[in-house]
Amino acid sequence: MKKIIIIVTSFAVLSVAWWLGSPLFINKNISEKAEDIQKMMPITERPQPVELAVVYQGNFIGADDFHKAEGTAKLLKAEDKYFIRFEDNFKVTNGPDLFIYFGKNGSYTKEAKISALKGNIGGQNYEIPADINPLDYNEIWVWCRAFSVPFGHAVLK
């Protein structure tokens, strides 16, 4: 019985260690294009693609020497929908349980969760949930929920 408890405990500890540690040495590249946002729009009988207007943009900065972030983030509007676009130059230190949030004046807003981060490198698009008004915020944050720490943010101007 003692051996079974040791084996089960060891397996649980190793599983948690892998979940927490593996993102530190595994990168996930995403290569979505801005044009892919067209596919996220409702299908209608319009003769031309929807125009994407840049509302705000900013550059990512890391939270500290360990949690690094760089690249451009844009808030885009297409008809009545808003999207966040991380350009191809986006890169952030990978980690467990990373999510994208809006923030304001130097802190993220827990209630303004956009989505789980698709990957830590490359261009990516996120539709903003309808219950969030992006104009109420001036920052985009990459936040680790597991440890409640920022990995980086971009101030939108």
Image (cartoon, helix red, strand yellow):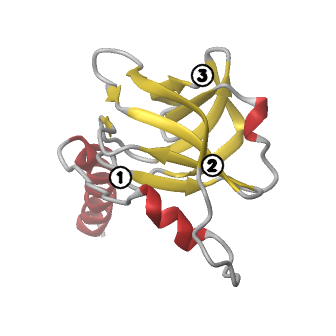
Residue displayed at 53% across by 73% down = 39
Three-letter amino acid code at the position of disc 2:
Ile
**In terms of sequence position, does the residue under pointer 2 or pointer 3 come before the other?**
2
**Where residue 87 sits in the image (x, y, percent)?**
38, 43
Which residue carries the number 1 mark? 119
- The residue positioned 30% from the left and 48% from the top of the image is 122
- The residue wearing badge 3 is 157
Mark closest to the chain's N terminus, 1 or 2: 2
- Residue 145, horizontal then vertical, whole percent: 53, 40
The quadrant holding residue 30 is bottom left
Disc 1 residue type (three-letter): Gly
Q: How crowded is mark 2: few (under 14 residues within 10 Å), some or many (20 or more)?
A: many
The quarter of the picture where the C terminus appears is top right
What whole-number distance in Å separates the C-alpha atoms at marks 1 and 2? 14 Å
Label 2, on which residue?
Answer: 114
Numbered circle sitting on residue 145: none
Residue 97 as seen in the image, left or right of residue 103: left
Depth order, front residue of 77/135: 77
